[in-house]
Amino acid sequence: MAPPDLHPAAAQGFSSNAGDYERTRPGYPPAAVAHLAAVHRLGPGTTVLDVAAGTGKLTRLLLATGAHVVAVEPVAAMRAVLAETSPGAVVLDGTAEELPAEDGSVDAVTVAQAFHWFDGPRALAECARVLRPGRALSVVYNHRDREAAWLAEVNRLVEVHRRGTPQQWDGGWRAAFAREEHFGPLEEVGFDNPQTLAVEDFVGRIRSMSYVGALPAAQQAMLLDDVARLIATHPDTAGRGVVVIGQRTVVSTCRRR
């Protein structure tokens, strides 16, 4: 069975904005990485498969555990940045639905900021195939504070352009786990991970969103101007030059049966 085509927003948006993604997207706090290292028993002699690795935000941190890291990323522009940011990782083209790994060959699978793009059941079956018995999969997401007034207003400006593009915040990615036969239940741990950005970098973070990056140039420019104008005038952000994004990193882990 062939892997599904990449969602057009992911294929186009991430191809055009890999630099913005790397520069403006948040990483992961040391406590979250330590949790991953502990739960997967990572270290020399273990292999972790980082799926949909993007520009290597998590990949480079997994390398620091001493594990052998194989990073899989289907978008060529993201993969090029990944190879630069994560020397020491094996970087491969591939998708979650058709992983470039042998049966039972890895000790851990990680997926950061990406599971909502997958065909969930097929991806989970592939993760189970490549994992050694009793080993685990971790899905990692940074969740920004959607209740902050200024961010809520930014979201209203941006999300009219989403038009059905998969997103993490609606929890739809969890549906595949509810009917999963290969893994046990998800166990979740959260870690604070606030991010401070210069205003222009926050605008770049918005541009790095898949469906924003895929907009026609004129429409994208109008949206980003509106975002910059909102930040310049909103009482919570006006005149400060930086924005602070309340954020929490959630690690959801399930063990292969």
Image (cartoon, helix red, strand yellow):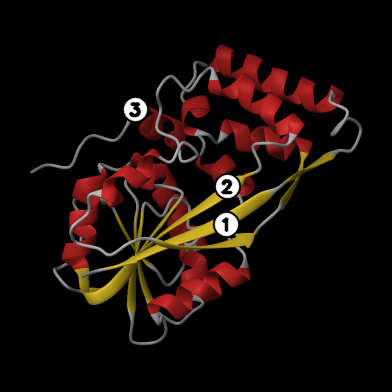
SS type, badge 3: helix
Neighbourhood count class around disc 2 (C-alpha, 10 Å): few under 14, some 14–19, many 20 upward: some
Q: From the viewer's perspective, is residue 126 above or below residue 215?
A: below
The quarter of the displayed image where residue 226 is located: top right
Mark toward the start of the polypeptide (2 vs 1): 2
Q: CA distance from mark 3 to mark 1?
A: 27 Å
Residue depicted at x 39% and y 76%: 40
Q: From the viewer's perspective, is residue 134 above or below residue 242?
A: below
Mark toward the start of the polypeptide (3 vs 2): 3
Q: What kind of residue is marked 1?
A: Thr
Q: Left of 94 or right of it: where is 155? A: right
Q: Nearer the viewer, mark 3 or mark 1?
A: 1
- Residue position marked by numbered label 1 in the rendering: 249
- Residue position marked by numbered label 3 in the rendering: 8
**Which is nearer the eye, 236 or 201?**
236
Q: What kind of residue is marked 3?
A: Pro
Which percent across, then down, holds residue 124? 24, 54
Which percent across, then down, holds residue 89? 39, 69
- Residue position marked by numbered label 2 in the rendering: 143
Q: Are marks 2 and 1 in contact (CB under 8 Å)?
A: yes
